Amino acid sequence: MFEDVEDITINYEEDGVQVIEELDKEIITRGAWATVLFRYRQWERSREGYGPERYTIRRYRRINGEYRQQAKFNISSVEQARKMVQVLERWIAEAQEGGAGGEEEEGD
């Protein structure tokens, strides 16, 4: 497991092959619960190469000084990611227009 949120990675190697290659990450929230957004690609044996970029959101909980994964959501395509962004932007705009700032404290 990971002691520091900065050290969290989804890189994964199996039988000498890097099966999951982390391309980037953004730490969204920190604290007892951490939320991390990853950009990655996965090795496809049939193609003998990496597939398209993918994204995943993972939640980690700090237990006994170590971050342990508690939940994850894989975003399966660029198109799905775009749709999620569009919906979130619309909801945020609606909340701001309605006077509900929608601002939560980090870590919620």
Image (cartoon, rainbow, N blue to C red):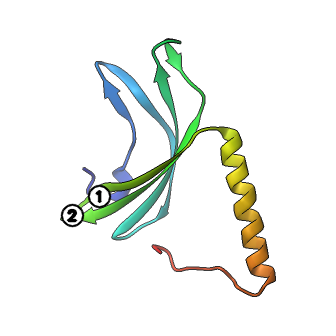
Where does residue 103 sit, x and y in percent of width and height? 62, 80
Q: Residue 53 location, x and y as percent? A: 59, 33
Residue 31 or residue 69, whichever sits in front: 69
* Residue positioned 36% across, 50% down in the render: 8
Q: Is residue 29 above or below residue 96?
A: above
Front residue (pair 17, 77): 77
SS of the residue under disc 2: loop
The residue to which callout 1 is attached is: 67
Q: State whether residue 65 is above or below residue 98.
A: above
Few, some or many residues within 10 Å of mark 2 (<14, 14–19, 20+): few
Q: Name the outermost residue toward the bottom.
A: 99
Callout 2 amino acid = Gly
The quadrant in which residue 54 appears is: top right
Asked if residue 33 lies left or right of residue 98, the reply is: left
Dot 1 falls on a residue whose secondary structure is strand
Q: Which residue is drawn at 39% across and 25% down?
A: 18
Disc 1 residue type (three-letter):
Tyr
Residue at 65% from the left image edge and 79% from the top image edge: 102
Side of 15 relative to 86 (left or right)? left
With respect to residue 90, does 108 lie above or below? below
Which is more toward the observer, 92 or 27? 92
Q: Residue 65 carries which label?
A: 2
Task: Please tell me in which quadrant of the rendered image residue 52 appears.
Answer: top right
